[in-house]
Amino acid sequence: MDSSTQACKVVVRDAATGALVRSGRAPHPPGTEVSPAAWERAFAEASAMAGGLADVAALSVGGQQHGMVCLDASGAVVRDALLWNDVRSAAAAAELITDLGDGDEAAGRRAWADAVGVVPVASFTAAKLRWLADAEPGNADRTAAVCLPHDWLTWRLSADRDLGTLATDRSDASGTAYWSARTGEYRPDLLELALRGRRPDVPRVAAPAEVVGALAGTTAVLGPGTGDNAAAALALAARPGDVVVSIGTSGVVSAVTATAVADDTGIVAGFADATGLHLPLVCTLNAARVLDAAAALLGVDLATLSDLALSAPAGAEGLVLVPYLEGERTPNLPRATGAAHGLTLRTSTPAHWARAAVEGLLCGLADGIDAIAAQGVPVDRVLLVGGAAWSPAVQQLAPAVFGRPVLVPAPGEYVADGAARQAAWVLSGAAEPPSWDQPGLRAFEASPAPAVRDRYAEVRGRTDGQ
Ligand SMILES: Nc1ncnc2c1ncn2[C@@H]1O[C@H](COP(=O)(O)OP(=O)(O)O)[C@@H](O)[C@H]1O
Ligand SMILES: O=C(CO)[C@@H](O)[C@H](O)COP(=O)(O)O
């Protein structure tokens, strides 16, 4: 299962071969604050669409990372979950940095990067907990355990609902900012710092292919699950040298590495992967929905938006869209709004606007690839996944903006596929994930267009972003 921001997707795959047997999907409610019960309802609907789970022997949950699900002592949800893209915790994140640096921001950044491989931003659970402690102290007092969306779903699907059975995996634990991918240990002091002295229970961090329970009412085993980006890497069997660019609700650039990253600028987050390795990652808040918004603005569907973008000249003759439509996480400008620059009579056309939307989205991701490379991570292959990777304009313009060829796997649900591969791994009890056929890769190449990135950088620099 992939319980991601906009939808729940279920795939049933043959454990030995990986062949797709059935699939289903159901939407999630909009917004950045969601009742976790909605994820369960969407899972029930998606599973029913996939023909039910009666013949399923193992299940794993891939899910949107970060966020905050607070449970009281009886296991009931204390308040609606805050999602990774909810930015009300931005000031709390900034406070946590200076708190750990004894008032010195630079020292705080270094201390967080050294401690847990990440520097707090609004998305991370630690920042959301600090917000909760200050804005809703009663809810913070009632919180007996805190977990993430995928942990909660695995627990709810399990036969054993004791709070002590809550389990997570390295990948999602590394997105809390109170667990270190480098040491494999929680930092209870940082959890306590976030919650101003409170210390709720946190899920046990399971090994990559550990059985964490049984699916309620069945003999099927539950895998530990994983964060959606780690699941996609597992589905693609990403290896060192591969960089996966995902254009879903979030825009993500990530890579599997043997060693942990500790970037005190906070641009590259030092997350863990789903196999025992690491997953340095850059995440933007504005990705596929930039295209959704551009299509809505122009009154066209996504296919027409793509045609329009491809019909305009490279660089949209100077029209640039800095697409911070929901604030931004990378760069860390949570209160930013979008900006357009270069509107003239000539560029005031739907085609220019469509082109600027696609190029603006891709320029932010190109910055992410550069940031990953600057950490010493090799970039041999770039693989493009996520809903907007199905857009012909994205496929054709990405190699020009990124300045390197791009490989696009056949359209599919790679997060759910990664969760399925983990489930098959758990079931097998083997040391390695099963060898499944890999999706066919379509290569896209184009002449690099550095002028597009230069112009974007110039315009981005002119907007203060707030
Ligand atoms: N052909 C397409 N062109 C552009 N965007 C698309 C296309 N198909 C789907 N999308 C967009 O992809 C997004 C969903 O991608 P997905 O990776 O499933 O997101 P998430 O996992 O965050 O829920 C939606 O915003 C949707 O509009
Ligand atoms: O916050 C991050 C990664 O750090 C996001 O990638 C979320 O994990 C949401 O993913 P999608 O719904 O866009 O797949």
Image (cartoon, rainbow, N blue to C red):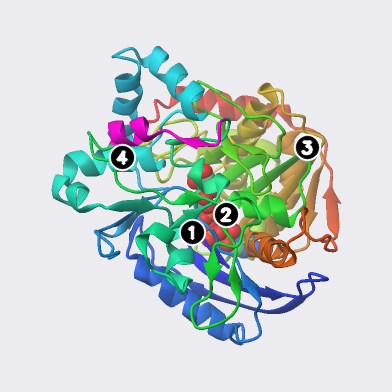
| Earlier residue among tags 1 and 2 | 1
Secondary structure of residue under mark 3: loop
Disc 3 + disc 4, Cβ < 8 Å: no
Which residue is situated farthest in the left direction here?
A: 138
Magenta region, residue range: 183-194
* Distance from Cα at disc 4 to Cα at disc 1: 21 Å
Disc 4 + disc 1, Cβ < 8 Å: no
Pinpoint residue 25: horizontal percent, then vertical percent: 56, 75
Pinpoint residue 360: horizontal percent, then vertical percent: 57, 40
Q: Quadrant of the C terminus?
A: top left
Q: Which residue is mark 2?
A: 226
Disc 3 + disc 1, Cβ < 8 Å: no
Secondary structure of residue under mark 4: loop
Q: Which residue is mark 1?
A: 150
Pinpoint residue 203: horizontal percent, then vertical percent: 43, 51
Q: Which residue is mark 4?
A: 89
> Which residue corresponds to the image point at 76% horizontal and 38% vertical from the top-left?
400
In this view, 102 is above or below 328:
above
* Distance from Cα at disc 3 to Cα at disc 4: 34 Å
Q: Which residue is mark 3?
A: 240
Q: Indicate which label's residue lies in the foreground, 4 or 2.
A: 2
Say what amino acid the circle numbered 4 marks: Ser
